[in-house]
Image: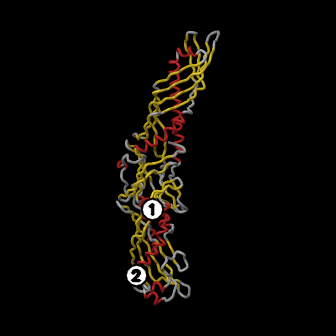
Amino acid sequence: MQKVILFILLAVKHLQCTQSALANPGLQIAVTAKGLDYVADVGIPKLVEELKTTTIPNTSGRADTPVGHISYDLSNIKIGSFAIPKYSFTSGSSGLDLKTSGIHVSIHANWHYREDSWPHISDSGSADISMSSSTLDLSVLLGRDSSNHMTLKASGCSVNIGSLSIDFHGGASWLYNLFNDQIASSIKGSLSGSICDTAVKYIDTSGNAAIESIPFVSKLDSTAEINYELFSDPLFESAYFRTQHKGEFYSIAHPVEAPCNTPAIPPASAVDDSHMLYLWVSTFVPNSAAFVYQDAGILTYNITPNTSIVPPGISMNTDFFGAFIPQLSKKYPHRPMEFDVTAGKYPTCTVSNNTIAFDVPGSLVAMVLLPNNTMVTVFTLDMVVRTTANTTITLKNGTEILGFEDTLLSIDLKLISSEIGMFDVNTLQKTVQLIATYIMIPVINQYGTTGIPIPAVEGVSFVNPEITLGANYIQVATDINYKPTTFV
């Protein structure tokens, strides 16, 4: 009956927290104008290299000349150099806007003409084409699909060619130079279209490869994974763009929603340009992790005289504990003992302006081994272990990790039941502190070191991150370093 009641209570709590889990994101990321400037500085050279490979179609036409009506064509048109001296990458109303100016492009081509009438004189040579004072504008749309994954698409590309001059060489190049304005006009359209086609294809292909490198579900170990699907559509403001993510840990074996509140995260409008990137992690994220690992039995320990986890200074027998509880050794003299230590409810994390604290509620069941090799429970303690934590940012295997390291703060003990009569639980305070220090805290820190992986495009690392604590959230303000493998 007790198990049924417990199941009903958990089910009700699950329904309540499933609704609250939709109230706020667990994680929020904002990239500032300074961050976008850096992305442009890194990305423009890669875009230029791609634009150099632009395939420009052959151009042909007909013209009246002093030697008669001719047909001409330009072929094997190849870009030799492509320079973008001025550019900006900013957050627009619905995406990111790349604007460039002062573009200069040098192009080499072959020319050929043939007189339309007899005697069909023909000639050929080469040409150097110079495009200058030109601009390239491109919009990048970021969105969310039905699976709550991020999408990226280039749109709105435009090229404005300010000046295009052609210098013909060889053969009757003097003839071409007579009407190069006509040829320049005909090549402008195909040139601007080809440049846009290359830029859009590059952004779509490389950009989506970069998006796919972001781990929206990341497996941490055999027990847990974390879900970073988008909580809302990306938001674009003039000073930043922002993404919000679920940030919930799930059990791999039995995935259910964590019964935890999702406190509010500060609005991204609070950012400034002193850093490239801001990250907020609410207490929902570590609390959902605690729920998963506690449910998997990670915080359950059986301490016996023969286990290696017995803290120094403690002997697991009634003679040792009889010094604190005389009636124990009197009723069960010279007998081995065992402790079952269990976290009865998942640990909870709270964050204030200067402290990160974890409360680990649990119980300690003390048992005595009788001469007939049966175990008897002698007393049960209710306890709350309180810890304080330091946070760190560490790069591990190409991923930035928000880690925690706990230190014991205090322990509250309460006697729940006793087969040997009442006793002062404070006499066991130091013993339980040793158990917490040598057994519970190291296990908690093992998972705290695994930490919370920060979702980011492959190749991004933090530079001089600064951690600030707020009301149930952790803020990281940082610059970034990017060694791209695929995209800007």
The local secondary structure at tag 2 comes to: helix
**Which of the 4 image quarters holds residue 427?**
bottom left
Residue 30 versus residue 408 in the image, above or below: above
Q: Residue type at mark 2: give it.
A: Thr
Name which residue lies at 45% across and 62% down: 404
Residue situated in front as seen by the camera: 114 or 464? 464
Answer yes or no: is residue 68 visible.
yes
Q: Residue type at mark 1: give it.
A: Phe
Name which residue lies at 51% across and 37% down: 47
**Mark 2 burial class by Cα count in 10 Å: few <14, some 14-19, many 20+:** few
In the displayed image of the protein, which residue is found farthest to the right? 119
Residue 373 versus residue 434 in the image, above or below: below
Residue 48 at x, y percent in the picture: 52, 35
For disc 1, the marked residue is 404
Protein image colouring: secondary structure
Residue 204 versus residue 108 in the image, above or below: below
Residue 97 at x, y percent in the picture: 43, 38
Residue 98 at x, y percent in the picture: 44, 37
Q: In the rendering, which numbered label is found on residue 428?
A: none
Disc with the residue nearer the chain's start (1 vs 2): 1
The local secondary structure at tag 1 comes to: strand
Disc 1 to disc 2, how far (Cα)?
A: 31 Å
Residue situated in front as seen by the camera: 272 or 381? 272
**Which of the 4 image quarters holds residue 19?**
bottom left
**Number of marks:** 2
For disc 2, the marked residue is 427
**Mark 1 burial class by Cα count in 10 Å: few <14, some 14-19, many 20+:** many
Answer yes or no: is residue 145 visible.
no
Residue 62 at x, y percent in the picture: 56, 16
Residue situated in front as seen by the camera: 235 or 184? 184
Q: Mark 1 and 2 residues: CB-CB less than 8 Å, in contact?
A: no
